[in-house]
Amino acid sequence: MRHTLSVLVENKFGVLARVAGMFSGRGFNIDTLNVAPTHDAKYSRITATVMGDTQQLDQAIKQLHKLIDVIEVNDLAQGAFVARELVLVKVAAEEGAKRAEIVQICDIFRAKIVDVSHRSVIVEMTGNQEKIDAFMHMIEPFGVRSMARTGMAALGRNRHLELQ
């Protein structure tokens, strides 16, 4: 089963390494990992999606709580949450009909073309993983030259937490 964890940590050197090491030590493969400061620069939020059974995940969450500098751990699968991912894609796009088709696909997915050259365009799109996967499926036949995905960023919807 896929789990999305939101881990609020102190924004200090080595915290990410300890959190990632705990997952690898427990045999979890991290599917996506996103780390960024929160609105308070003293804290960072680590959002990780991992595959594993619930019993293993419960043990991993208990271990996360024991790590120094970890403030809070939430398994977002336990409630409603909002999740988004960002993808930047450089697509082969010679001028003409091919470029017009790419623009149409971008419109359908509410993606933005953020850079244009004679032979390619760079597209920015945000959404949930399924939306990004569908967009990539539609854009691949044009020729993806390179791609960067951020990994999921997520927040619980109905949680009242002081440090969020």
Image (tube, rainbow, N blue to C red):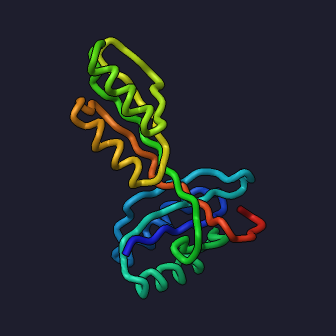
47, above or below 84, in the image: below
Q: Is 159 displayed left or right of 162 in the figure?
A: left
State the residue in front, 144 or 38.
Answer: 144
Question: Looking at the image, which residue sits at the far right?
Answer: 162
Q: Residue at x 32, y 12 (%)?
A: 118
- Residue 24 visible? The answer is no
Q: Residue at x 71, y 62 (%)?
A: 164
Q: Position of residue 27 (x, y in %)?
A: 34, 75
Q: Position of residue 104 (x, y in %)?
A: 38, 28
Name the quadrant of the N terminus: bottom left
State the residue in front, 69 or 109.
Answer: 109
Q: Is 32 displayed left or right of 65 in the figure?
A: left
The quadrant in which residue 57 appears is: bottom left
Q: Residue at x 31, y 28 (%)?
A: 91
Q: Is 9 displayed left or right of 117 in the figure?
A: right
75, above or below 153, in the image: below
8, above or below 133, in the image: below
State the residue in front, 157 or 150.
Answer: 157
Q: Position of residue 159 (x, y in %)?
A: 69, 71
- Residue 139 visible? The answer is yes
Count the marks. 0
State the residue in front, 29 or 79.
Answer: 79
Q: Position of residue 157 (x, y in %)?
A: 65, 65
